[in-house]
Structure formats: C-alpha cells, structure tokens
Image: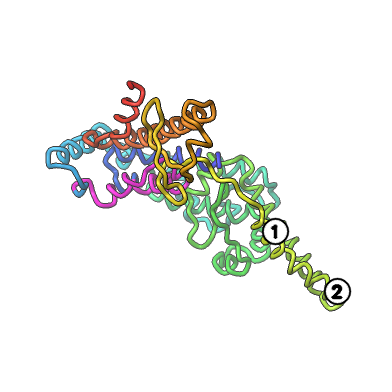
Amino acid sequence: MDGNKDAARHCFNIGNSALQCGNKAKALKFLAKAHRLDPSLGLGTLLSSLREGVEDLSGQDSQAQNEINQSVSGTARACGDSTPNAVASAEQVEIVHRIRKTKDYYEILGLKKDCTAEELRKAYKKISLKVHPDKNSAAGAEEAFKHVSKAFAYLNDESSRAMYDQHGPEDPHKLSRQSNARYRYARSGYAYDDMFDADEIFNSFFFGSENAFHRAQYVRRHNRASATRQAQASRNTDSSPGLLTLLQILPVLALFLISLIPLSKPVYSMEQVAPYQFQYSTKEHQVQFYVKSMDFDKEYPPGSSSRRSVEAKVERDMIEMLGYNCRREMNHRRWYPSLQTPNCDKLQGFYVQ
C-alpha cells in the first residue's frame, strides 16, 4: 500500500506540473493514474473538470472562468513550453536511435544472455532514466522508453525469460501468448501484457516497494508449485474419494461457522443509515450523530464518562472528516482559485466555537 501511495504522489507531482504548464493531456494522464493508485487523494472532481474542459466547469460564472483560463495560460507562459523545444544532446539521440533499431531484449539493456537478476535491474535503472521522455528530449524517446520497459518486464520473469532464451526475439507477441506472461498491476506490483504500461513499470520500480518484482516472481513460482500439487492430488482422487469430498466441504463449513460469530457494530454513525435512525447531538459542539436504540440515554446517561467518551469520538470523527475534505478543497483550489471551500470554513468554525 505504501508503494502505491509513493507512486501516486509521484504521478500527482508530474500531473500537477503539467497542468501548471498548460499541458492538459499529460496532466489528465498522470492525475488519473495517481487517482487510480490512491483514491484518497480526492482527485475525482478535478479529473471530471479536466475531461470536460475548463470552460465547461459547472457552477462557475464567466469571470471565474476567465480567471482560470488566465491562470493556466499564465503558468504555461511561465513554463516557456521548454520541454517540447528542448535540444537533445548527441548522446541522447544516439541511445534512442540504438534502442529503437534493436530487437533483442538483452541488447536493448546492454546485457549478455547469462546476466544475473541484479545486473538486469541495474541495467534497467540506468537506461530507463536515460531515455525517459521527461529527461530525454530526443525524437522517439517515448518509444525507446517503452522498448526498455518491455524488455525488462519480459526478462525479469524466470519463465518468460526461459521461453525467450529458447525461441529468440523473432516473434515476441507469439512468445507472450505461449508463455501466458500476463501480470496485473496490484499493490506495489507491475503490469505486463500485450498492452503494458511502461510508466507503471517505471513507477513501480522506482517508487514502489523495493521487493515488488521479487514478490511478483514468487507468486508465479508459488502458482506453479500449487498447480503441481493439485495435479498430484487429482491422480490420487480414485484412491481417496472420501478425503477429497471432505476437503471440498471444509470451505463451506468454515464460512457457515464464521457467519454464526456475532459481529459487534459501532455505537454510533455519522450518517442516518439503518439501523442508526435516532438522532443526537454532542453537548460541546452540537455535532449530529445517530444511534441504534431509543435507550441510548439509559445506556449512556448524559454527563456520564461513557457518554462523554462517545461524544468525544464523534467530534474527533467530524474533525477528521472536515480535515480530509478541506485538504481536497485546497488541493483543487490551487488550480481553480474561485472554487469555494465549505469544509475548510466549517473546520475553522469548529475550532472557533
């Protein structure tokens, strides 16, 4: 989870810089990726606004729209559009040209066929930084970056690397189908399939957990071992049908037993949802909350230590909720100064009372 949050912050910073420079397409790409990795960043409203276009923001008058447009265009001029007009060095042009014309994955990474896993990781780290589009302004840098990421993703897995060593680079798509080398991007993992995302591999490598790739390989090996054990079990089915039946019933029995365990519910809810239907307010700040029973005053008498404890938790929950929403509002306000911040106002009033 921490790896995902680090990658999300990295994508957010890139998207933020792109938005301030007026590059909405790039901003939308990286902010959407940040939102996917860490939904708690609260970028949903901003992403919707970016997709619809600044001029279509709901609830904004013409003056506010002009302020937004001037702000975005002003930051774009301040950035000077330096990225697309930057002059690439001879070394940058040469490495991009070499990678784009090379088909062998080992040659792309500058490695020999007998290289170790650590050498593979070091080579990817070195070359990916040299051809990353944010650092290399040569034409074709993005394509070269994808080639490097694809080569690393393929060779980093033992089974797909063995398949590649056997058949060579002549038809990598066919090899991909044969080896079924598909990874799904999960917590601190990475994705690889025919439509892999080079940026996700890069972010996972540099900003995810340091053992992300090793864990992905472990899962592959573990799955293969599990498949072997299952095959062995299937061969023994005829000799032990009773045991197999018992093993099939156990998960259902376990679920049934778990369902019998009573689960305690919170004393209160901040929203009026079943079974929390009876409204109360805290004594100090009049924060509304809801309870399940009309006997709440009997169970937690007003003025008692138990009642004060419940009301203190309610007010802490309210402060956390307002603080979270306030951070989202201030984050959005960086790009749209005219947006209102009702949760920040409530939070400030909460402390003034």
Specify the segment rendered in magenta.
28-55
The structure residue drawn at horizontal position 17% and vertical position 36%, both measured from the top left corner, is 67
Residue type pointed to by label 2? Ser
Query: Whole-percent x and y of residue 210?
Result: 61, 40
Mark on residue 39? none
Which residue, as the protein is rendered here, is positioned at the far right? 239
**Could you tell me if the residues under marks 2 and 1 are in contact, i.e. CB atoms within 8 Å?**
no
Which residue, as the protein is rendered here, is positioned at the far bottom? 238
Q: How many marks?
A: 2
User: Relative to the observer, which residue lies in front, 286 or 206?
Assistant: 286
User: Relative to the observer, which residue lies in front, 247 or 95?
Assistant: 247
* Residue 12 forms part of the magenta stretch: no
Query: Whole-percent x and y of residue 271?
Result: 40, 44
Q: Residues within 10 Å of mark 2 (few under 14, many from 20)?
A: few
Task: Identify residue for label 2.
Answer: 240
Quadrant of the image for the N terminus? top right
Q: What secondary structure predominates along the stretch shown in magenta?
A: helix
- Work out whether 338 lies above or below 25: above
Which residue, as the protein is rendered here, is positioned at the far top? 352
Task: Identify residue for label 1.
Answer: 257
Q: Is residue 107 left or right of residue 283?
A: right
User: Relative to the observer, which residue lies in front, 276 or 339?
Assistant: 276
The nearer-to-camera label among 2 and 1 is 1
Label 1 residue SS = helix
Query: Whole-percent x and y of residue 107?
Result: 58, 52
Quadrant of the image for the C terminus? top left
* Residue 32 forms part of the magenta stretch: yes
Residue type pointed to by label 1? Leu
